[in-house]
Image: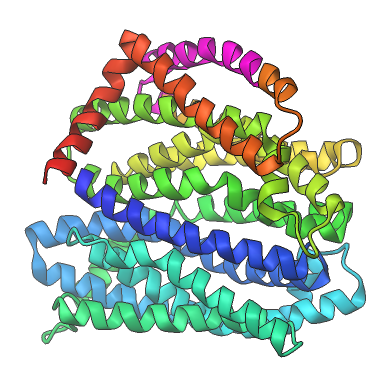
Amino acid sequence: MFKAFILLFSGSMLGKLVGFLREILVATIFGTNTYISAYRVAQTATLIPVEMFLSNSLEAGFLPIYLRYIRNDKKMAQSFLGGIIMLFLLLSALVFAFIYWGASYWVSILAPGMDYQAKLLTSSMLKVTSVAVPLYILGALLARLEMAYNKYLLASLRSTIQSIGLVVGTLAAFYLKNAIFLAWGFVWAYMIYMLIAFLRLKKLNILKWPCDLSWKLIRETLVLFWHTIKHVLFVPMLIQTNIAVERIVASLISVSVIAAVDYAKFISEIGMVLLAVPLGMVGIVTFSVQDFSIVKQKLEQIMQLLLILVMPISLFIMYYHSDIIQVVYVRGAFDSVSAKITGQILFGISIGLWADILSYFLVKALYAQLRSKEVLIYTFVAVVMGILVKLLLYKRLGPLVLGLGVSVNAITRCIFVIHAFGLIRPFYLSFMKIALGSLPYILMCYFISHLFTNISQLLYLMLSIALFIIYWATYVLLNPQLRIHMSPLWEKVKGLIKR
């Protein structure tokens, strides 16, 4: 599990680095203007119907079932895979048709605050990005298929290839003076990804059509797949509804806020991409074939380790949100107004960032244990809470409400999934130990902010990061309980270094 995590972590790190360069490039060229806001809406409009049936059905249905089949009945596994490929090809065609021919209508729902010209541009971009739908869906399926054989290269490369495609699209849009190339960058990325995935699985002899294809077996396996995911299908609907409401509220506040949300989320999602996503992917493969008692023991260890890592990071982003935005984005077209809006959203997200990362991982563990009905209930309550915050308070709080909505959603979901695994007590003990160290840290940050007033913002932020590492490393080392939770990770790292 640790080796697989390191591979995914490395791929995510590379992807985030390329993505970081991409976001700086996009912010410098477009800031939060209409062009980039139109692209953000078009991308969201493309991914919402795709993720409605894709992400959770692959992780909660395809992967656990396929893993059980390849251990017990390889013929059933091949029939199941053939049926899933045909099913997903059909679904991708339907989604493409919906997006392409309903582009104008779909945009008007997601961005009611946009003016006519902005909606027209967004609709044009959406028709382009719809071309990537079958590529995106099949690429995701092939990556999960590779994971079933304990290989994670495709999963680790996805974010990097997407970012490279968007960088190329951004440069093309700038030099050719045509914003539509932003959308083509998304399509190019998934064309390349799909080609790499196909060649990779053919080389590994994983992707092969069964010679004795049995329609009866396909029907039987797809029926099992349906019974496994029928509750799961409502989860992405809730999540995508939440995203749609987020876009709608952002457009009602200001068109600039649409792009600002994604700039803020890019920073806040670093922990998600580097920690939660790799752990979740490996967890689904590992926990799908283990007993609950073993799974619970491992989850407790990982939960406590995650808390030690992500709670201080959440606090750091919360305190230094404005400085982070200034250093990362403020240049070119990204002015002080854009920085203020993005900073408010980032502050709101940082409040519950730790809960978002932790709950993401624990939800994947529930999927691995085929407990999708529970995930549906928890997600429903959490999404409703987040949406209510956005709809009721956006006029009063402005952009800040978008970040607070994310945090309310995350904290609510986190409490539910921790309780589902019976981990409330170990969570509470670790949470309180870290919280006790937070007050002295905030006081130290306040003192430093008044002490170093004549240095550049970049140097100030770098100094703050160095002190953050020193403080929390010392705090964990001096606390026996926290130190014990960190020791397994340290042993794994030492073993990796020796090799």
Indicate left or right for 73 with 149 as reference. left
Q: Residue at x 54, y 48 (%)?
A: 269
Considering the image in quadrants, where does the N terminus appear?
top left
Q: Residue at x 48, y 56 (%)?
A: 233
Indicate left or right for 155 with 98 as reference. left
Q: Is residue 434 magenta?
A: yes
Which residue is at the front of the view, 374 or 261? 261
Q: Is residue 28 magenta?
A: no
Which residue is at the front of the view, 176 or 426? 176
The colour scheme applied to this rendered structure is rainbow
| Quarter of the rendering containing residue 52 | bottom right
Question: Where is residue 26 drawn, in percent x and y?
Answer: 68, 67
Question: Where is residue 112 drawn, in percent x and y?
Answer: 85, 64
Depicted 297 relative to depicted 232: above or below? above
| Quarter of the rendering containing residue 375 | top left
Question: Residue lying farthest front?
Answer: 454
Indicate left or right for 105 with 154 as reference. right
Magenta part, dominant SS? helix
Question: Residue lying farthest bottom?
Answer: 176
Question: Where is residue 31 drawn, in percent x and y?
Answer: 77, 63
**Bounds of the magenta span?**
419-445
Depicted 456 relative to depicted 38: above or below? above
Q: Residue at x 75, y 21 (%)?
A: 450
Question: Where is residue 376 drawn, in percent x and y?
Answer: 49, 43
